Image (cartoon, grey):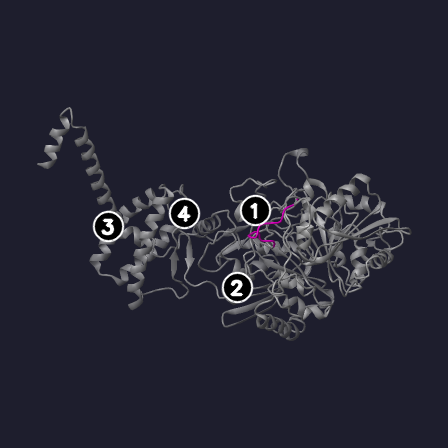
Amino acid sequence: MALARFVRQAKKPRGLCVKMTAVAVLGLCFVFIWSMFSSSSSSLTIRRESFDDISGPISAGAGAVSKSRNQSQKVESAKREGSKEDGEAKSESNLESKGQEVVDRGNSLSNDVRGSRERNEKQAVDKRKEKADSKPPKGKRKEEKAVDVSEGGEVQNEKDDEDGEEEEEGEELVMDGKEDQEGVNREGESNEETEAGADVVELTDEEATEKVEEDNGGSNSMGQKRKIKGPVFDPKARYSWKLCSTRSKHNYLPCIDNEGGLGRLRSYRHTERSCPRVPPVCLVPLPHGGYETPVRWPESKLKIFHKNVAHPKLAEFIKKHNWVKESGEYLIFPSNQSEYRAGVLHYLEFIEEMVPDIEWGKNIRVVLDIGCADSSFVASLLDKDVMVLSLGLKDDLVDLAQVALERGFPAVVSPFGTRRLPFPSMIFDAIHCGSCSVPWHHNGGKLLLEMNRILRPSGYFILSSQHESVEEAEAMTTLTASICWNILAHKTDEDSEVGVKIYQKPESNDIYDLRRKKNPPLCKENENPDAAWYVPIKTCLHTIPASIEQRGTEWPEEWPKRLETFPDWMNNKDKLVADTNHWKAIIEKSYLTGMGIEWSNVRNVMDMKAIYGGFAAALSQQKVWVMNVVPVHAPNTLPFIYERGLVGVYHDWCESFGTYPRSYDLLHADHLFSRLKNRCRQPVAIVVEMDRVLRPGGWAIIRDKVEILDPLEGILKSLHWEIRMTFAQDKEGIICAQKTTWRP
């Protein structure tokens, strides 16, 4: 009756208000009825009880429910039927089709509606959990873990992996600048797909294929926290490998080389680090002329096999320089021959005479050499116990960094343009630029500001050149004065005709306040100087620490005392001592004697998941050097590694490493895969990357959970690696494998 009265009133000329009231009442009724049905729909909440089908936030444009998702839902329904009465099971079955329609429509809802719905789902799940605590469900899988859902729809394990949780307590994490650049079209972004999809895996059945596609088809954001239940590698998968078909062939660097573009218009290398959207899973071929087992250290300092580093532009380079010569199948490096006419030893002595405080091997231990132009500089300093890390620039088409690695010298390849280098701040005792051709004064001196960031307070910047123009000298003088670098010495060596300038970074902030022009300005307090992964170079000066509890206020102890000295700014010193003793015992009792590794053939070593450098410190008495890699999103322990006189870089193992193929003799991965299983879209690409950087005949030691190592062993066998040793105890295990020369 009331509704009829409203209709009659609405027909009157002045019934506009009545019409609006009626519409509002009907709308409220519809909303109330809809909310009642959507919140009480058991089919909707039951379908999300396990969350097995979610690998990340649900996209607004998601399509139909996949086959694997339906199968997991059927399994969950079967479990519930075993624990409920027949009438309840029948009711759920009748609601199943209705719930399907709700899920399909929900895929096109806005983010706000979806977030509200999943909050309701979370409440329903929590209620079921409370009931399940008193009576566990029948047939529950042993390895199944409880899960929780955040507001945004991200799936998170109730209990994370136990590995590394201790080490993260109280530690600042490595910052990933790539997260801040999501949605931004970065310069040089690589759009090529390479041939990853065709080369990676062939699965045993269609269900497994759809599962891999669902797991790998998540968000492109590297910083997104995705929790994937189960092992990293699909145990049902079988692998069929193919060779990479790339422009750079046997010297392929996936994140450096430019495989996109058209014809002659494409450049050989990216101006910035730019990785393929799909991680490469093809195998890099061996050199065309074959591959020889590298010359052993220390003989490799004087000669290497030419075919192992063959490159067309390298042959042209050899003809123009006297410090490297071709002799039969070898490249020869004559002793004390270098770009400097009077010899590299005379050059080093000349630097010490200019600044006596530079005591190679004592006061100066860790040095960054820009450009890899003349590796005789690195070789001579190694004899003085100086650890020199050579930075191979992206435009070095001669591939001199590859020559340095083949000789057994530390080197890393990285573009150097608009982004920070993958190092923390205030770590290098000295930086050397010997005719490195870097335009320091261009773009407002950004590149020199980056040197200022990574140089230790009171550290030295050594610049030498044979032909410096007046304009360049004036620009460099103005720029160094603006950042308060003190020029300690400027002198030309008459014997070698090389002009050398030695600058020193300030040791306190007082001098910054005395500048007339505050350009460049001081960085903001919230600007993290250690953030380096995909972070653009800042046009500002970071302040120098003033408190003794801060890193950088004191110069480290002389080598080798600094290797075992723990500075005052370090927290948790007990953990550092325990880490050092732990790896010392393992290496002495197991790695050196119990695995069959021929350590006389090992020179270049990489610790793929370094923490405090304990692994590298335990190998300090061996004739090896260790590249300590600290993964992004891990505790930021790389500054302490440098404080000990060791070297390393930041890296995200979801991408390819900045080095040439066949660079390392031994790879060490301690619980790397268990820590990355929730981050990388295609974990098998990490194994392919290990195959790329490891030399034929090289070794890999992998420690992880048994559930990860079992399928991993199958992958290594499919690559024709020889499994030398396996051991497992209490769900933890170790694999020692050796790479062969096999290529598909």
Q: Nearer the viewer, residue 420 or 551?
A: 551
First along the sequence among labels 4 and 1: 4
Kind of residue at badge 3: Asn
Residue 329 image offset from top left, x and y in percent: 82, 53
First along the sequence among labels 2 and 1: 2
Residue drawn at (68%, 33%) of the image: 264
Distance Cα–Cα, label 2 vs label 1:
34 Å
Kind of residue at badge 1: Ala
* Left or right: where 29 falls relative to 612: left
- The numbered disc on residue 168 is 2
Q: Nearer the viewer, residue 698 or 340?
A: 340
Residue assigned mark 4: 58
Crowding at dot 3, Cα within 10 Å, few <14 / some 14-19 / many 20+, comes out as few
Residue assigned mark 1: 196
First along the sequence among labels 3 and 4: 4
Distance Cα–Cα, label 4 vs label 1:
25 Å
SS assignment at label 1: helix
Using the rendered view, name the quadrant where residue 9 is placed.
Answer: top left
Using the rendered view, name the quadrant where residue 616 is placed.
Answer: bottom right
Residue 739 image offset from top left, x and y in percent: 65, 60
Residue 30 vertical position relative to residue 162 in the rendered view, above or below: above
Residue drawn at (48%, 64%) of the image: 161
- The numbered disc on residue 94 is 3
SS assignment at label 3: helix
Magenta range is: 519-529
